Image (cartoon, rainbow, N blue to C red):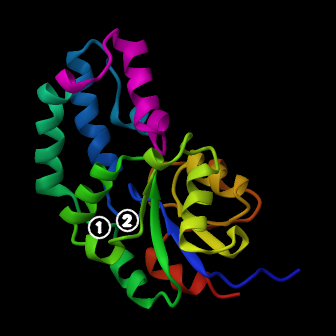
Amino acid sequence: MSVPSPELVIFDCDGVLVDSERLTAEVSAEILATQGWAVTADEILELFTGCTDEFWRDEIEVRTGRRPDHTWDAEHGHRYERAFDERLTPVDGIVHALHLLEVPWCVASNGSHAKVRANLGRTGLLPLFEGRIFSAEDVATGKPSPDLFLHAAATMGVDPVRCVVVEDSVPGVTAARAAGMRVLAYMGGDVAEDRLAGPSTTLFHDMRDLPGLLVD
């Protein structure tokens, strides 16, 4: 059975477009140590990669007894901002891949609109996604629910079966499969291959290979 030609590529943001996940985990580990939770950057990546901001806040509250809110952001937000301003870069090879794509693309992230726009802006990618940014804020339930990907496809006017999702997390891959979309699972981060492998999924390690993987 042939695979339908893609008419839309839906990208996750963190870890797929911008190289932010390790950076976020390192800063989070430093902050959480001061709140009584001795956790490593690797453990944070295992727990939170691909999850919603709400899940993150819930888990921090369980572990530390304090829920991250505007007070938390006032105390610690500048540490993330400084790290991102100084060190955030596009994922290696993504600019090359985008310039070679022959079908439309968009971004659908569990992060907030403000966060996605800020990170795309820091890395110079925002003009390439302007007007095509979707967030878990747009739907009732973020990944691993398929709602966000289905919303992005509907807004872009493309049948889900004609969409290809580029993801690097278990919640993201799970959501894409549930939406009936083909998945290209980018192995540039810290998630083990066996956690992302599965039906309708192709694993790859270099973003420069992405355009070729869209060919039937």
Tag 1: amino acid: Pro
C-alpha gap between disc 2 and disc 1: 6 Å
The reply to whether the magenta stretch includes residue 50 is yes
Please tell me which residue lies in front, 50 or 190. 50
* Mark 1, other Cα within 10 Å: few <14 / some 14–19 / many ≥20: many
Query: Which residues make up the magenta segment?
Result: 46-72
Sequence-first disc among 2 and 1: 2
68 over 11 or under it: above or below:
above
* Residue 188 colored in magenta in the image: no
What residue is pinned by disc 1? Answer: 90
Q: The disc labelled 2 sits on which kind of residue?
A: Leu
Q: Pick the residue in front: 198 or 158.
A: 158
Magenta span: chief secondary structure? helix
Tags 2 and 1 touching, CB below 8 Å:
yes
Residue 170, percent from left and from top: 59, 47
| Residue 93 visible in the picture | no
Residue at the (12%, 25%) spot, across then down: 75
What SS does tag 2 mark? loop
Res 17 label: 2
Where is residue 95, by image quadrant? bottom left
Mark 2 residue crowding within 10 angstroms, few (<14) / some (14–19) / many (20+): many
